[in-house]
Image: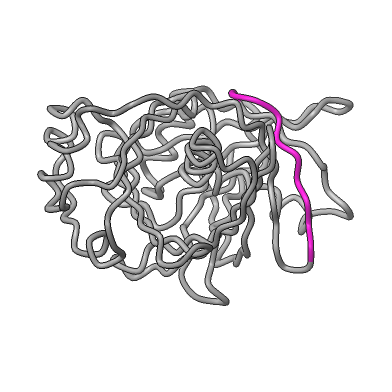
Amino acid sequence: MPRHCYVLRVFTRGDEGGNHLGVVTDATGLTTDSMQAIAVDLGFSETIFLEWKEGEIPRVRIFTPGAELPFAGHPLVGMGWMLKQLGPGGPDTLRCAAFDVAIRHEGEVVTIEVPLGQRVRPAPQAPSLAAAVNLPEPVSARWVDMPLPYLLIEAESVAAVSSAEPVPAEVFEKAGADMVYLYALASPTVVRARFFAPGHGVFEDPATGSAAVALAAAMRAEGHASGRLEIGQGLEIGHPSTINLEWHGAQASIGGTVRKDEVRWLDA
């Protein structure tokens, strides 16, 4: 049956940039295969589908062009924004496969709060992968399970992050990595980042909220019990994006602004 798909940009920088997102607010009758097919057809880094029964916490499912994800940041922020536009108030909690997330609205900024229980572990293979993407010897590298494993590689400078060269999925697979987050501190409170997940059909992502949460988990594991960072991403691919990250104890939050581009009809 025909149904709406809202096309948003999440984590924008003012009216510019952000990460495109498909939002389907009525997943009635859609199978897993049909959701995956819609995500492939749209071609965005992620598409999110809403399943909401009266009296229950709204449940969402998130798909890249290559697979379903248990958690992703920009789809949840985008869905939180969309639901408030569709009706007064909107829900204050969404349920994804990994956990429940709380939603806050402060002016134009939409923020989600998530538990910070991710496992952080060493990443001995990071130097070889860094060399493959033309990155100097990393300052540090850790695996963070989101619950899917993300490889976080800290570079020595913003210039090193910007000059990194995206590579085919086979190179990542050979290094034993699936999703890679490169970042560098531009200042004590500002980060420049890039994210690659070619095995999921996402060659380079303009803004990656889940990777920002992974960064908070890594920072906490290093002894930073709380903190606040502004993450700039997407400049290298023409989609400037800004993610506001905060963490304290066992909770983290990511937030940003959202813009709507269009509404499409899906024949599904």
107 part of magenta stretch: no
Position of 194 relative to 34 (above/below) = below
In this view, which residue lies farthest toward the bottom?
15
At which x and y percent is residue 198?
Answer: 25, 40
Q: Nearer the viewer, residue 196 or 253?
A: 253
Q: Nearer the viewer, residue 139 or 7?
A: 139
At which x and y percent is residue 217?
Answer: 53, 36
Residue 10 appears left or right of 233: right
The prevailing secondary structure element of the residues shown in magenta is strand
Question: Residue sitting at 59 percent across and 23 percent down?
Answer: 97
At which x and y percent is residue 239?
Answer: 39, 67
Residue 58 appears left or right of 76: right
Q: Quadrant of the N terminus?
A: top right
Position of 73 relative to 126 (above/below) = below
Residue 64 appears left or right of 199: right
Total marks in image: 0
The region drawn magenta spans 97-106
At which x and y percent is residue 2?
Answer: 58, 43
98 part of magenta stretch: yes
> Does residue 78 appear in the picture of this structure?
no
Question: Residue sitting at 55 percent across and 44 percent down?
Answer: 73
Q: Nearer the viewer, residue 264 or 111?
A: 111
Displayed quadrant of residue 250: top right
Position of 194 relative to 127 (above/below) = below
Position of 199 relative to 24 (above/below) = above
Q: Nearer the viewer, residue 101 or 137?
A: 137
> Does residue 167 appear in the picture of this structure?
yes
Residue 127 appears left or right of 53: left
